[in-house]
Image (cartoon, rainbow, N blue to C red):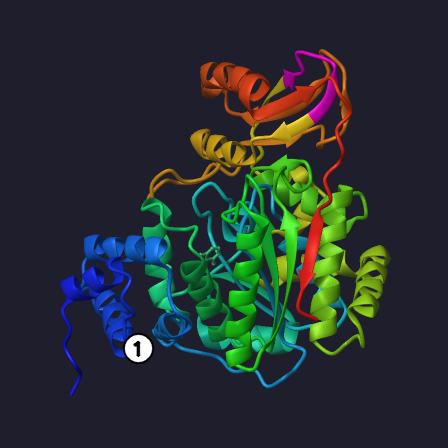
Amino acid sequence: MTQVFSTYEIIDKKKRAQDLSTEEIKWFIDGYLKKTIPDYQMSAFLMAVYFQGMSVTELAALTDSMLYSGKTINFTDPTVVDKHSTGGIGDKASFILAPIAAAAGVKIPMVAGRSLGFTGGTIDKIEAIKGFKTQMPLDEFKNMVTKRGLVLIGQTEEIAPADKLIYALRDVTATIDSIPLITASIMSKKLAEGARGIVMDIKVGHGAFMKKIKDARALAKSIIATAKRFDRKCTAIISDMNQPLGFAVGNSLEIIESIETLKGRGPADLELLSVELAGQMIYLGGIAKTPAEGIKKAQAVLKSGKALEKFREMIKNQGGDERVIGNYDLLPLAKVKTDVLSEKSGYVQSFENQAIGQYLNEIGGGRKVKTDKIDFGVGFYFHKKVGDPVKKGEKLLTIYHNENQKAQIQDLKKIFTKEIIKVSAKKVKALKVIIEKIGK
Ligand code: URA
């Protein structure tokens, strides 16, 4: 017989920093899935976890309850490896690293997310390509991984459904940036999709959920420990999120920048990070003897054009219009462009990166409420990185928008020059995209 607990007492215990038992946590998650526990009580529970954290045992119970809330796949093939990012601004690295690693022989069962808070979502971005199917039955997903080597889907009802529900609730209750909640969310999905190895990109900075390096390290350790408990290989890269990754922010613009990078014409930071993460995947999959050898293989694959072909193949396999690779007009990019010019000469000092994500949502590129439809066309294309010299009157960024948004864009122009992009008279050091590597 299943034990019955009190929802109120579980929330109250967590609020008072008392440890919950494995049975209590499982009962709570099951109740939420069955809808016997309503959103408001789950929200209170999440906020209590946000403030009080979780012990190692509690985190294991939460992860397992979310993982086994749906079906799980178990690949025995050691070359099945995936990557996951904690989310950022302009983070399109998956579209580059996944085809690179797949072209080198890694099999990738990628289950990615939609936008969360101020960060963009891989699934929203790929849906800018007409026809691209991001949902499929689990059997089809598994077959495609084995036969084609690369599949990218969104979370389904079958994979970690508890995370799907809790993720959407965290998005609107200010409970995203919690180490145990992020660990359980990411690992329930990654463990359910069956990858033998997982490469984590932990973002740190203004435009990330982890603002401080010490929290990014703690999150990396928490995820690696969870992977170890399930006998999965895992490495983490801590990467900078104090400025957008690459130059493009916004769904269609990011797809174009990804394709350009696969053609060898991408921004240096985006290429460097993608090649590093792909190299780690190649190494974890046993296709290279060391991470350095994995990175070399990744560079060679990118240069040969094989990664671009893999990306084209993935679009075709999943019903998308692969002609987009040679014709960007097939993307629904907004037609009106407004340049934002620098008001002074100097050096780019900083970006309010989180605000960039929030303003993208404001102009329709992301969601403000769960039911919002995304405008794939709007976005920001930055012309500068931190440390770059800039002259008065030179372009800082170009805003892509719709005709009926002209008044809103005039306000945004002022916000960008006054609050978001700071220009200093003194020289500023460029930022390194890769900050630290944790694990092998
Ligand atoms: N990505 C996820 O899948 N979950 C989180 O909680 C944060 C980023």
Q: At x 51% / y 36%, what residue is drawn? A: 354
Q: Is residue 177 left or right of residue 329?
A: left
Residue toward you, 405 or 323: 405
Residue 341 sits inside the magenta stretch: yes
Q: Is residue 406 above or below residue 255?
A: above
The magenta span reads: 340-348
Q: At x 72% / y 52%, what residue is drawn? A: 273
For the question of whether residue 114 can be seen, the reply is: yes
Q: Pinpoint residue 151: horizontal percent, then vertical percent.
A: 58, 66
Q: Quadrant of the N terminus?
A: bottom left
Q: Pinpoint residue 333: horizontal percent, then vertical percent.
A: 58, 34
Mark 1 sits on what residue? Answer: 22
Crowding around mark 1 (Cα neighbors within 10 Å: few <14, some 14 to 19, many 20+) is some
For the question of whether residue 93 can be seen, the reply is: no
- Secondary structure at badge 1 equals helix
As shown in the figure, which amino acid type bears the numbered disc 1? Thr
